[in-house]
Amino acid sequence: MDRIKLNILDLAEVRWTRAGSMKLGGKTLIYSGGQTHERGIGILFNVTMAKSLGRWCPISDRVVVAKLVAKPLNLGIIQVYAPTSDSKDVEVEKFYEEIEKAKGYLKSQDIIIVMGDFNAKVRDERIEDVVGPSGIGTVNVRGSRLIEWCQINDFIITNTW
């Protein structure tokens, strides 16, 4: 069986407390958790990507940002784990504020990738250049909020294309 080769892997529900980094068999893991063993997120970098890892910042147990030094442009990665549809709207708005805070650690000329679990359904039809024709099912409330945020910030939901 072939081994899966990954350069960068996003992790949700890591469930570790605090924030930190560690080496794992030549790979580098950065993670951000809360005070309890709930939620938590991380990003695992292979050896090559880890060499490019510049600064990183844990924003919360739902958002972490990392900057990879590259040429011609640096790469900013924001890893997220959004509140579920059962969460209160105030928690969802706090989550989007945390993403905005993470974007503040990056420069406007950086290539920015926001990845992770948005706990959202965005529908199966194209919406402008944000949602492609290969989304899943019917849009839910969290999906509508994600689409709105992407439209405002000029992002696309890549797994729908």
Image (cartoon, rainbow, N blue to C red):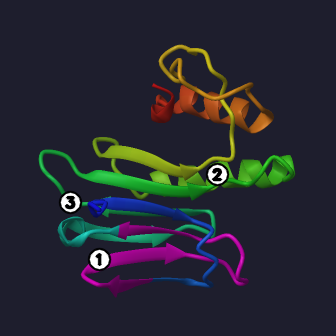
Provide the residue designation for mark 2: 97
Task: Identify the mark nearer the N-term, 3 or 1.
Answer: 1
159 sits to left or right of 44 = right
**Label 1 residue SS:** strand
Q: Nearer the viewer, mark 3 or mark 2?
A: 3
Q: Looking at the image, is 26 positioned above or below residue 44? A: below
Please name the residue shown 32% across and 85% down the image. Answer: 23
64 within the magenta span: no
Q: How many marks?
A: 3
Please name the residue shown 20% across and 60% down the image. Answer: 69
Please name the residue shown 71% across and 29% down the image. Answer: 144
Q: Nearer the viewer, mark 3 or mark 1?
A: 1
Mark drawn on residue 69: 3
Mark 2 neighbour density, 10 Å: few (under 14) some (14–19) many (20 or more): few
Provide the residue designation for mark 1: 27
Picture quarter containing residue 43? bottom left
90 sits to left or right of 156 = right
What is the span of residues highlighted in magenta in the rendered image? 21-44
Say if mark 3 contacts mark 1, CB within 8 Å.
no
